Amino acid sequence: MLLIFNESQRFSQVWLWAIILSTSFIPVIGLYQQMVAGVPFGNNPMSNLGLGLMLLFDAALLFFFWSIRLVTEIDHHEIRLAYRPFMRRSILWSDVQKAEVVNYGFVGGWGVRYSPQYGKVYNVNGKMGLALELKNGDKLCIGTQQPEDLEAALKQIRR
């Protein structure tokens, strides 16, 4: 099917990346100081192996956050949602009772959250999303950084 809306989002908050990257510098500095300069790092120094393992953990955490994507694809047949690497879901338009672009506000953070008004909220940034009410009574909201394009896609589907 021909896509009428396609969006891939990732965590782009500067503060989040600053925290993750800054923690990675600690084992790098420690390893340099202990292995190259020959000076123990801190009052109770960790072993070089421990610092190396800490660096590997930080690198894995960095890669994990970098790999998270919220992907939304919409065509005339269905909505495909992927919160990579965690889940994938398809929703047929024939199962949708109501769809609208909304400002869902702050729902307690980013990721997968629950909102009494919107049900499960999938987001990585911002406060705009596609609120869906399904015929079976389930509700969900998919965050977007392109609310105008999403609204235009909904208008195409409603024709």
Image (spheres, grey):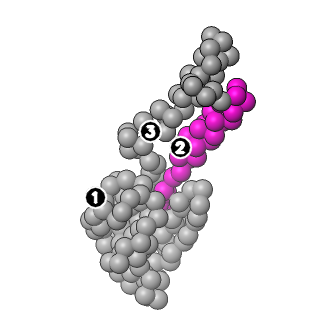
Q: Which residue is mark 1?
A: 148
Residue at 70% in and 28% down: 47
Residue 15 shows in the view: yes
Front tag of 1 and 3? 3
Which residue is more in the foreground, 128 or 78?
128
Q: Is residue 60 magenta?
A: yes
* Helix, strand or loop at mark 1: helix
Q: CA distance from mark 1 to mark 2?
A: 26 Å
Disc 1 or disc 2, which is closer to the eye? 2
Segment tinted magenta in the rendering: 47-76
What's the mark number on residue 66? 2
Q: Residue at x 63, y 33 (%)?
A: 55
Residue type indicated by callout 2: Trp
Residue 142 x %, y %: 41, 65
How far apart marks 2 and 3 lie (CA) works out to 13 Å
Residue 115, given in percent of the width and then of the height, sits at: 37, 73
